[in-house]
Image (cartoon, rainbow, N blue to C red):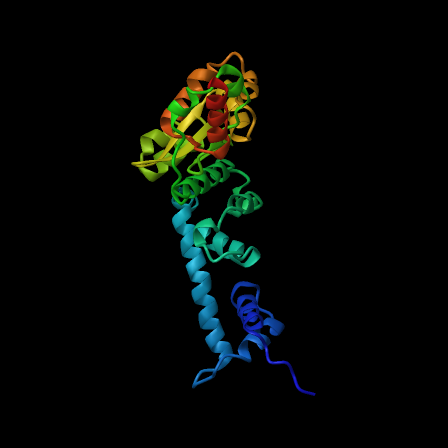
Amino acid sequence: MNMRTPSLADLQQAMRRSLLEVPNESADEHAAAVVLADGLDPQARLNIYRNTAEGVLVNALRLAFPAVQRLVGADFLEGAVRLFVRAAPPRSAWLDEYGAEFPAFLAQMPHLSSVPYVIDVARLEWQVNSVLHAPEVAPLDPARLAQLDEDALGSLRLSPHPATRLLRCDSPADTIWCAVLQQDDAALRAIELADDPVHLLVQRVDEGVDTLRLSAGEWRISKALFAGEAFGAALACAPEADGFGLIGAYLARGCFAQTSQIAGCIRIERGLST
């Protein structure tokens, strides 16, 4: 019986299983069958490729979580990352988006149960990584909103800029993150882990990444806006807060992106006024 010649997709899947998944005889057998020995056993060649692939992923995550590495130590982080890589190999060739699940993976490790702030710092560092690699998108020009009447403005839904994120942490992760990266021992000693949760805006700026603390009311408005709630409904989430001042600050910071809906509302408004 003639055996079917494997397709390119078959070969790629076999190599992926062999390099990124927990090695098993089936995966290695299929991958080794297409590797030329040329003086070196195919299994030995696969081991070289496997170690290289794992090393690249480990290094990518080490670079994404520098403060976590300083908090837990390089050896512990590398061990945790290697476990993560084997448990959750990448699903995309774009390494900048690999690691979103790593903070949740760390949270399951019993070794870190006594230092939960490490998980919050990991969550913050992932948001920092995400905004740093977010696409370049033109921010919304505040002047465009001035062309809308009160009804149109109240029903408008703003789109958050991809380089802007929200994050709630049970510990002062922003202060810990800054102090650790700056190696500021005095600042670390002054941190009170029992403080109230922090609500953060994480944004890419010209100088790198900025974190802004929000009050409870500002957080409720921000969550609603970033979730796509209408302008008026978002403001109603915290009537005690200065919602217009917050949105004005967000517009000045470029926290929202230009969308077709805004352009459409402006066209409608112009049409009604003629």
Query: Residue 23 vs residue 53: left or right?
Result: right
Picture residue at 55% right of the left edge, 26% below the top: 224
Q: Residue furthest top?
A: 240
Picture residue at 46% right of the left edge, 25% below the top: 266
Q: Quadrant of the N terminus?
A: bottom right
41 up-or-down from 184: above or below: below
Do we see residue 138 in this rendering? yes
In percent of width and height, residue 25 lies at: 61, 74
The front one of 38 and 137 is 137
Q: Residue furthest front?
A: 274
The front one of 245 and 19 is 245
Q: Residue furthest right?
A: 1
In percent of width and height, residue 41 lies at: 48, 82
Do we see residue 75 in this rendering? no
In percent of width and height, residue 215 lies at: 47, 20
The front one of 157 and 241 is 157
86 up-or-down from 234: above or below: below
120 up-or-down from 40: above or below: above
The front one of 201 and 25 is 201
Picture residue at 43% right of the left edge, 86% below the top: 39
162 up-or-down from 190: above or below: below
Q: Residue furthest bottom?
A: 1
Query: Residue 228 vs residue 172: left or right?
Result: right
Picture residue at 55% right of the left edge, 24% below the top: 230
In percent of width and height, residue 34 lies at: 53, 79
